[in-house]
Amino acid sequence: MKAFAVASTALAAATFFAASAVAATSADPIVIKGSKFFYKTNGTEFFIKGIAYQQDVGGNGSTTVGSSTFTDPLADPVGCKRDIPLLQQLSTNTIRVYAINASQDHSQCMQMLQDAGIYLIADLSQPTISINRDTPQWNDEVYKQYTSVVDALQNYTNVLGFFAGNEVANSVNTTGASAFVKAAVRDMKAYIKQQNYRAIGVGYATADVSDIRIQLADYFNCGPAADAIDFWGYNIYSWCGNSSYSLSGYETRTEEFANYTVPAFFAEYGCNTVEPRDFTEVAALFGPDMTSVWSGGIVYEYFQEANNYGLVQINGDTASKLPDFTAYSSQIAMVTPSAVNSASYTATNTVARACPTTGVAWEAATALPPTPNQQLCSCMLPALSCIAKPNSNDTAVESLFAEVCGLVQGVCDGITANGTTGVYGAYSVCNGTEQLSWAFNAYYQNQKGTQNNDACDFNGAATTQAAASPTGSCSSLISQAGSAGTGTVTSVPSGTGSGSGSSSSGKATATKKGAAGMVTVPSFSFGMLSLGVYVMAAAMYNPTPSVLEKAEEPRDSCSTKERKKQSMDVHFKHTELFGGAIVVDLPEGFRDVSTIRQVPDNQEVYLDAAGFTSIIFDITERVRDVATDDEALRFHLHDIVESGDGVRVWRSGAVECEKLPPSTPTLHLVATLPSPPRPSSTAPAPTLILLSLLLIRFAAQDSDIVVTINVPFVPGSYDAEDVDFDKGKWGRLGEVAEKIRERVVGSFEVREWGLFGEGE
């Protein structure tokens, strides 16, 4: 059981406020020169001795989902008065706050921090308004959130800088989101300059992911200086227990950043796999091996929470020191980093990194999304003849995007946002309702002169209006965007950032989440099976070569005979999932969908070369409120298909994965479900979909892995006379599904148990 030491808050507070009496009326701003921070007035080098200071908001790589509520610690003067003396005992000169409520008053806390000589690095996002790695967007809503935080804090001279993102990309298949974060960096830098605010740096806090750490550092540093980060934050937890400069990887990381052109520091550190933490890495971070490259770091975290990273336990108005507080206090008190003076310092790291090339190891293009422009979006809506009705729920809107974008090629070009291809529609910067209206109108205009009298209906979700002709500045903006929405808008209204970004110069074939390409409007959740079905459906319903652009021939050129042959000739290859943490045998010719579009980081999705069968691996939280594993299996089935209508389970039972511990519960079922609704098309629809579901349960890791093999029975791909499920006749496609399932069961192996978060 952990020991608690109650701080003498009264004594610490008395010391603090005595010091406050002689504090300067404003803090000496921290400025950047080359790859170092300096005090502006006296030129002394500034090393960050920081603490992450916020409760209940995702740090340490965590994500807060589904709640818009959070506690802004800088709007809590009582908490600041309690905590700042303790921060001073930890020699703190910087705090990091992950979410700011710009509408609240921060003056009292900021003054107390200033009096204590403590600076602030603030993240610009908040839990429900940020750049999501799975469905990234840089639109007017996120832009407004970011600028509101800048506006709220810019006047305080103890604001050191802002983070435009935190661990947004955490795998190769989420690196495409980096284009959107870099656009945010560009636009916030431009906004600060345009508003004539003092120079405040804008940076990014990265995850320590071996597959992409170099590419990320290169990408945010490359290109025009106006687009690049001003500083680089590194969330790193590789020094655990009694490690060393070499064993922890600190030595290698230092070598990698030796020639970086901007300041780099640890935006989070403090591994807790060995408890209590002894913080021996502090001596290395502020020692001679690292201070020429790194400008200090921020320990995670002040407040004790469920993840056990806290230095202090809060009970009401009382702050109790934890063992980690004492250990860190003793370590940080001993450091004396060797500093240089700004006047005698000449930056030698002056060459920015080269931008990484897009490919299998990196998915972010150098072309960035355009700057959000609320005036453009406001001008667009009245000019439309068909618009979306307000107040649709997320699920309905998600479905509507999938429907309208799949009806006719090109109707969603104006709202496409693809960070991998660098193709961005002019209206991709608008909010979800505005973008849906644009898509509805594009389809409505396309259908004029046809017999389609319901082109502006979409089951009551759309309505017509009298379109107004744009005038004045609206006329110019709409003209720049172009009739297809693929032009480049160079006009930027007063009060917004000045980066024009890159707009579409070609065409993108895409639908909302579920098509060939990536339209990220807006961010919605998407069911596991739906992802597989819609990826598959994009290949079937879209008449253009789409998802499988690298296949040897388009799907439509594959004859019935060839399809049947493909369905029987199944050869397997060893495949690494989740960065090699899991290995399994999958059919040759199946393509990793993450090389085509973004996939949630808890999923791996594979699709066959003909665009038919999909295999999905999904890591989920373990279902607890069930009495048996069989009930858990049924729970996942119902969660996947969302409805029992037309779903028939033909068989189920327990199986054994040979390469997993013998006690690992593993269950399997086979079901059929009706073909999902689809837009009108001349392409054949599936008669039904065969679902082979495998559930692997890991109690110690509190995780379930759900594997689904989705096989659409499309006319022409099977012999109807060979299929009669009531009589146990599965046909060739059913045999293939069973063969794949058996191979997955026999080869499934976990090689890195840390995938499930052990030790975090």
Image (cartoon, rainbow, N blue to C red):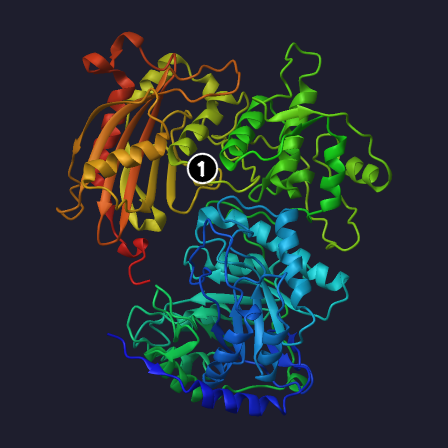
Residue at figure coordinates x 47%, y 78% from the top left: 290
From what the image shows, is residue 332 above or below residue 649? below
Taking the view exactly as shown, the residue that stands out farthest to the left is 662
* The N terminus, quarter of image: bottom left
Residue at 35 percent of width and 33 percent of height: 640
Q: Which residue is mark 1?
A: 526
Q: Quadrant of the C terminus?
A: bottom left
The amino acid sitting under disc 1 is Phe
Q: Residue at x 53, y 42 (%)?
A: 523
Quick one: label 1, few (<14), some, or many (20+) residues within 10 Å? some
How far from the left and from the top, in percent, is residue 177? 53, 49
Q: Report the front residue among 172 and 26.
A: 26
In screen coordinates, is 719 left or right of 403?
Answer: left
Q: Position of residue 79 (x, y in %)?
A: 50, 74
Element carrying mark 1: loop
**Is 491 on the left or on the right of 605, as rendered?**
right
Give the tally of numbered discs.
Answer: 1
Location of residue 46 (image quadrant): bottom right
Q: Quadrant of residue 18?
A: bottom right
Residue located at (64% from left, 70% from top)? 350
Picture coordinates of residue 364, whole percent (x, y): 55, 48
Residue 291 visible within the image: no
* Residue 403 shows in the view: yes
Relative horizontal placement of residue 494, taking residue 642 as reference (left or right): right
Q: Quadrant of residue 405?
A: top right
List x then y, in percent, for residue 251. 41, 73
Q: Nearer the viewer, residue 548 or 103?
A: 103
- Image height check: is 679 above or below 188? above
Closest to the observer: 21 or 693? 21
Closer to the camera in the image, 189 or 261 = 189
